Image (spheres, helix red, strand yellow):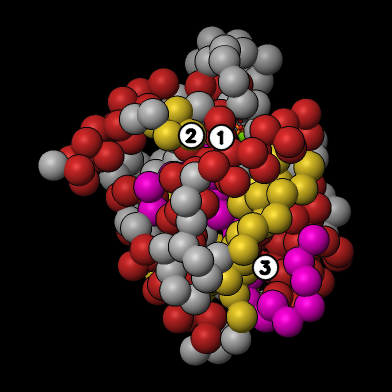
């Protein structure tokens, strides 16, 4: 079974604040995207990495990948991403060559996922699951509210409190049987926030395997501090 990783990396990173597109921001001197590509290439099963780049940064991303060492066994492709994550993933999937039968989808914004987590996801797909999501139990209790929206600071009414022990915070890489994911991306047209959600919508089973604390998403400025601390600890 040949495995490819699609990396949506076309976001601006609005929540991180002004600056370069998030995937191109440096973590301890190396662009976040390069860390993410290396995290996928670290798995011996991954033979191809497809990056969906910021549409105006495709050439820059190609040059970056050319200038940073990857394992000999790993090929890469760069395609322009789209206006939403969902669209960027679809554009990456469209670029997959024949002969790939397992696809990982991994956020460029999760640069530090350990290889053991990547391998566990691939293993679960090889064992027969069509969609596999790494996830962790929540530390915080979650409330459903009636959102005020528009940045209003008025108090929001609580609608309910789902039982925390039944909730999981999902990460990437999410792993899929290729045909299942392609079909889901073609069939689902409403906006979703993760790929497994599309597979759920077409009625196929999705399973969760243990995620990892270091697979957190770099979203806000404090996450950069945490990511650089994790890298520093790895080097120590
Ligand atoms: N992404 C993408 N194409 C988009 C939007 C997002 O490929 N049009 C990617 C991001 O580059 C990121 C991943 O999807 O690797 C997860 O999205 P998120 O963390 O929300 O990143 P951004 O959208 O860049 O950040 P923000 O929402 O703060 O702007
Ligand atoms: Mg976003």
Helix, strand or loop at label 1? It is helix
Quick check: 5 above or below 66? below
Q: CA distance from mark 3 to mark 2?
A: 33 Å
The quarter of the image that holds ligand 1 is top right
Range of magenta residues: 95-113
**Quarter containing the N terminus:** bottom right
- Residue 9: assigned label: none
As drawn, is 152 to the left or to the right of 45?
Answer: right
Observer able to see residue 76: yes
The tag earlier along the polypeptide, 1 or 2, is 1
Q: CA distance from mark 1 to mark 2?
A: 7 Å
Observer able to see residue 166: no
Q: Residue at x 41, y 63 (%)?
A: 42
Q: CA distance from mark 1 to mark 3?
A: 28 Å
The tag earlier along the polypeptide, 3 or 2, is 2
Q: Which residue is mark 2?
A: 31
Q: Residues within 10 Å of mark 3 (few under 14, many from 20)?
A: few
As drawn, is 161 to the left or to the right of 75?
Answer: left
Q: Residues within 10 Å of mark 1 (few under 14, many from 20)?
A: many
Pick whichever, 2 or 217, lies toward us. 2
**Does the beta carbon of the residue at mark 2 sit less than 8 Å from ligand 1?**
no
Residue 137: which quarter of the image? bottom left
Helix, strand or loop at label 3? It is helix
- Residue 200: assigned label: 3
């Amino acid at each position: 079974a040949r495995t490819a990783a699609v990396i949506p990396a076309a976001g601006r990173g609005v929540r991180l604040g002004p600056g370069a597109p998030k995937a191109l921001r440096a973590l301890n001197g190396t662009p976040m995207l390069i860390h993410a590509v290396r995290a996928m290439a670290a798995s011996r099963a991954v033979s191809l990495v497809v990056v969906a780049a910021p549409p105006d940064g495709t050439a820059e991303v190609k040059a970056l990948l050319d200038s940073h060492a990857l394992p000999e066994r790993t090929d890469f492709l760069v395609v322009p991403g789209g206006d939403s994550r969902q669209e960027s993933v679809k554009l990456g999937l469209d670029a997959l060559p024949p002969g790939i039968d397992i696809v990982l989808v991994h956020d460029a914004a999760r640069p530090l996922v350990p290889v053991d987590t990547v391998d566990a996801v691939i293993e679960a797909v090889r064992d027969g699951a069509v969609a596999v999501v790494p996830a962790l139990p929540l530390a915080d209790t979650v409330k459903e509210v009636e959102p005020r929206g528009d940045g209003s600071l008025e108090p929001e009414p609580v609608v309910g409190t789902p039982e925390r022990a039944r909730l999981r915070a999902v990460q990437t890489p999410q792993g899929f049987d290729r045909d299942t994911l392609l079909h889901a991306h073609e069939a689902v047209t409403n906006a979703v926030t993760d790929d497994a959600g599309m597979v759920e919508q077409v009625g196929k089973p999705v399973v969760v395997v243990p995620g990892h604390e270091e697979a957190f998403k770099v979203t806000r400025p404090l996450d950069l501090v945490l990511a650089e601390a994790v890298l520093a600890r790895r080097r120590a």
